[in-house]
Image (cartoon, rainbow, N blue to C red):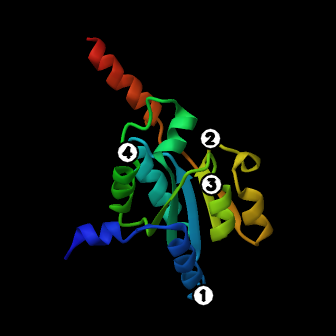
Amino acid sequence: MDYRKLISDKILSRETAASLVSMWKHERATIVFSNGCFDIIHPGHAQYLSEAAALGHKLVLGVNTDKSVARLKGKARPIIPEKERCRLLASFVFVDAIVLFDEDTPLELIAQLLPDVLVKGKDYTVDQIVGADIVLQNGGKVETIELVEGFSTSKLIEQIGKLSDK
């Protein structure tokens, strides 16, 4: 089995993702969408994404491009380039599609895909979740998932920085 192809086939353009989501909806699959920078993949991401995937049949991820991450997180970020972040995420069996977006928020991507379920971490309230209004207006739902305590990209970067100080 060619695992590299299985992984690379999950990384899609917006147009291809929209066509695939449309086909999945036609097949009556429930489409779950989440997004993030996913700069350093850690156990918290794995648990969060597996729980998000359990809310439907297909999990689609919007991933911030390198330029978008730098605008949001500062010039030192991302640590891992977009191509590699996408490959790491695509290696999760429960992730079905990945789409890069260059905007600061995934609003346009959410409007294009119109997922059935929009998911973010419990550190957000529904009124703070970008695209929640679009999903709700189109009959979908918005869910928040408990985050794994002790894991965050910012904390990991901080811990790694402390190692170099020793």
- Residue 116, image x, y percentages: 65, 71
Q: Residue at x 33, y 51 (%)?
A: 84
Residue situated furthest bottom in the rendering:
27
Q: How dense is the environment of label 1, judged by Cα within 10 Å: few (below 14), some, or many (20 and up)?
A: few
Q: Residue at x 69, y 50 (%)?
A: 129
Whole-angstrom CA distance, mark 1 to mark 2, is 33 Å
Instruction: Choose between 95 and 149: the one closer to the eye.
Output: 95
- Residue 132, image x, y percentages: 72, 57
Q: Amino acid at mark 2?
A: Asp
Q: Which residue is mark 2?
A: 123
Instruction: Choose between 141 and 163: the one closer to the eye.
Output: 163
Q: Amino acid at mark 4?
A: Pro
Quick check: 24 above or below 108?
A: below
Comparing labels 1 and 2, the label whose residue is closer to the camera: 1
Q: Which residue is mark 4?
A: 81
- Which quadrant would residue 50 be assigned to in this image? bottom left
Whole-angstrom CA distance, mark 2 to mark 3, is 17 Å
Earlier-in-chain disc, 2 versus 4: 4
- Residue 74, image x, y percentages: 52, 30
Q: Which mark is residue 26?
A: 1
Earlier-in-chain disc, 4 versus 3: 4
Q: Amino acid at mark 1?
A: His
**Which SS class for mark 2?**
loop
Q: Amino acid at mark 3?
A: Pro
